Structure formats: C-alpha cells, structure tokens
Amino acid sequence: MSRKEQIDLNRLPRHIAIIMDGNGRWAKQRGQMRIFGHENGVKPVKDVAEACTELGIEYLTLYAFSTENWNRPQNEVNALMNLLVKTIHAEIKTLQDNKIRLLAIGDLKSLGEESYAELMHAIELTASNENLALVLALSYSSRWEIVEAAKNIAIKTREGSIEPSDIDSAMFSEYLTTRSVPDPELLIRTSGESRVSNFLLWQIAYTELFFTNTLWPDFGKEDLYEAIIDYQNRERRFGLISEQINPL
C-alpha cells in the first residue's frame, strides 16, 4: 500500500502550515549560491499545493519570507523579491487551472511596489477559486502580527468602541492577519531544525508539529503524505485526558 493510500480521507487536517527551510544549505551542498536553492524551492511548492488539492486539504500556509529575512545580505533579498514576482506571474495559470485561491499574510506593503502589485493582482484574479486556499506568509513574523493586533485593539479601546471587558481570545484573533483562515492542525518544518521561528505563534497553540530532516528543495508529495500519516496516528487531546477523548 502506498503512503497516499494509507491516508484516511475522513480525518484530514483542514489546514497545513509549512516552514520551508533548507534552501541555502541545499545550494551550498552543490557548490552553488543560495539563490540557486531558492529557485529550486519553487517546484516543491507546486508539488505540495497539487497534493493538497488532490487530497482535499482546504488551506496551505507557506512561510516564504519573514520580517527577520530583511536582515539578510541585500543581494539575496533582492533576488528573493525578483523570484517572488517571477514565480507569481508564471504560476497564475496553474492557480486558475487548479482553482487555487491565493492569499497572503504579513506586512505586505513592505515588499516593494512591484512585488506588492504582482501579489495583489494574483490575489484578485484567483479570489473566486474554490479549491485550496494557498496562503503566503510574506514579510511576516508572529510577534509583529501580535503587536499590531494589540495596537489596533488599544486604538479602538481609546476611541470607546471596545470595552476592556470585551477583549477575549476570539476578539483578539479577529485582529490578526489570519482572521479569515482557521488555525492549522499540522505544522511541518523541513531541514532538521526543531523550532517554529516566530511563525503563527498564536495560531499553533494546539497544532501538531512535524519535523523532517529533508531540505525543502527535496521535499515532495511523499514527504507530505508521511507527515499527514504521522498526524493521523496522534491523539489530539486539547488539554483533556485520553479517557475524555475516547470514553469506554
């Protein structure tokens, strides 16, 4: 039985998030510049999005560029922004053909005029697609997102439109960039690193974490299936005990 056949289609995670890590190391192992790794990280995005669409996953969020990544060498940042524009432009037809809706979270205006315009154009063109929602986290960090939410709630409170007693976790979630996206049930990180790197800290409170040594350019459908199978073999208790989840 193949890995795909082992997946229980009745217990799929609704939302999978991925920290795509290892492009630079993958390139270095081949004696190439880091951008070579980023360029070869595009195909796994297509493969994973296709696999999620085939399975019926509703949301796929990819950590593409963090606010901290702006501190990388300028030539790498410029190359990544150019790659972003080039890739989005090249893949619009694929998104349309597969009825994939593109979304984005993060400090998007900081991406630069051309990158922002290309991204917004793709989001608008794919807005009515009804299969997978592909969410790109760009110029994103969770601490930035949480601080921005707190600032906006503080402004509303000062204006008198929110009472302090109104503030709870549900309200706070409505001020996050992910307010239209359900929390992920499964978070995958590639490249052997075992940390979440300031990604969706609020949203992954009860998310199952899966770490793999595979570098992102080598990550494919079979790796995704492995992560989903592992997820389905876990008991998700949400603070309860096993007997409450599975009573005799």
Image (cartoon, rainbow, N blue to C red):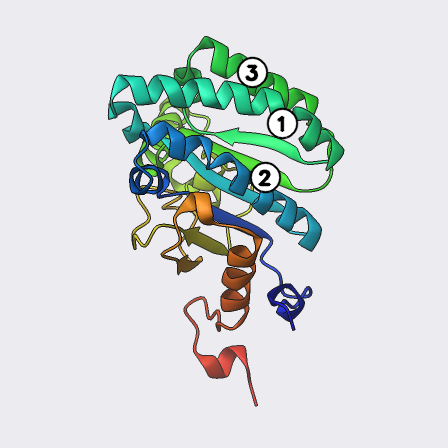
x and y, in percent, of residue 120 in the image = 57, 18
Do residues under tags 2 and 1 come within 8 Å of each other at their CB atoms?
A: yes
Q: Which residue is drawn at 35% across and 23% down?
A: 158
| Image side of residue 179 versus residue 52, left or right | left
Residue 90: quadrant of the picture: top right
Q: Which of 180 and 66 is in front in this view?
A: 66
| Image side of residue 162 versus residue 6, left or right | left
Element at label 3: helix
Label whose residue precedes the other's in the sequence (2 or 3) = 2
Q: Residue at x 63, y 50 (%)?
A: 51
Mark 2 surroundings: few (<14), some (14-19) or many (≥20) residues within 10 A: some
Element at label 1: helix
Q: Which tag is nearer the camera, tag 2 or tag 3?
A: 2
Q: Which amino acid does label 3 sit on?
A: Glu
Q: What residue type is labelled 1?
A: Glu
x and y, in percent, of residue 29 in the image = 30, 43
Kindly report the distance in space between the C-alpha atoms of the residues bearing marks 2 and 1.
9 Å
Quadrant that contains the N terminus: bottom right
Kindly report the distance in space between the C-alpha atoms of the residues bearing marks 2 and 3.
18 Å
Q: Mark 3 points at which residue?
A: 118
Q: Is residue 183 above or below residue 210?
A: above
Q: Which residue is drawn at 45% across and 17% down?
A: 82
Mark 3 surroundings: few (<14), some (14-19) or many (≥20) residues within 10 A: some
Q: Which tag is nearer the camera, tag 3 or tag 1?
A: 1
Q: In this view, does 37 lie above or below 241?
A: above
Q: Name the residue under label 1.
A: 91
Element at label 2: helix
Label whose residue precedes the other's in the sequence (3 or 1) = 1
Residue 20: quadrant of the picture: top left
Kindly report the distance in space between the C-alpha atoms of the residues bearing marks 3 and 1.
11 Å
Q: Mark 2 points at which residue?
A: 46
Q: In this view, does 137 lie above or below 222?
A: above
